Image (cartoon, helix red, strand yellow):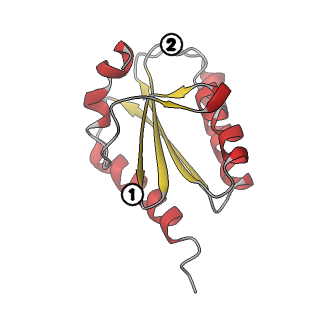
Amino acid sequence: MKKTTEENIPIAKQLPFKFETEELWLGGWGDVDFYCKQDNILVLLEVEKGQKHPNTNVLKVWPFLEKYPQQKVLLIQVIWSDNKAPKNRLNLCDFTGKKLEELFPTRFRYYKCYWPSDFQQHNKIINQKFSELKNIGKEF
């Protein structure tokens, strides 16, 4: 496990999932800091401490979704409050996440939050997005 990922374990433990201790390789598109699979949903966690281009960590999920058309994905992106990424790149995270939700409405959800903050409130929204994915296709 990379040192930066080890430093972020306390953040991963604040979330309602039991993440694996190694990164997930997304083919030639990069790695994801933390992941787990629960109820056939792949939950990805990216923690942005020093990343100046955090939007690429949202964008790299797109080719993965294209390659695995049956896989549902929830991407959680946590931005450290002292991250120096320009505001336009942080806004691109939201834009890209929303666009991917529109392109893959039955397979993808995105949530961005900041560290440190009250994760009880964030976990409510994260659980809601997870439930949406889990229940798609069970409406009938």
Q: Tag 2, which secondary structure?
A: loop
Is 22 displayed left or right of 101 in the figure?
left
What amino acid does circle 2 point to? Answer: Lys
Residue drawn at point x = 25 percent, y = 29 percent: 10
Residue drawn at point x = 43 percent, y = 18 percent: 49
Quadrant of residue 97 in the image? top right
Q: Is residue 13 visible?
A: yes
What amino acid does circle 1 point to? Answer: Asn
Q: Is residue 99 visible?
A: no
Is 100 displayed left or right of 9 in the figure?
right
Q: Say whether disc 2 or disc 1 marks the residue closer to the N-terminus.
A: 2
Q: Nearer the viewer, residue 80 or 61?
A: 61
Residue picked out by circle 2: 84
Q: Position of residue 39 (x, y in %)?
A: 42, 61
Q: Position of residue 21 (x, y in %)?
A: 33, 31
Residue picked out by circle 1: 127
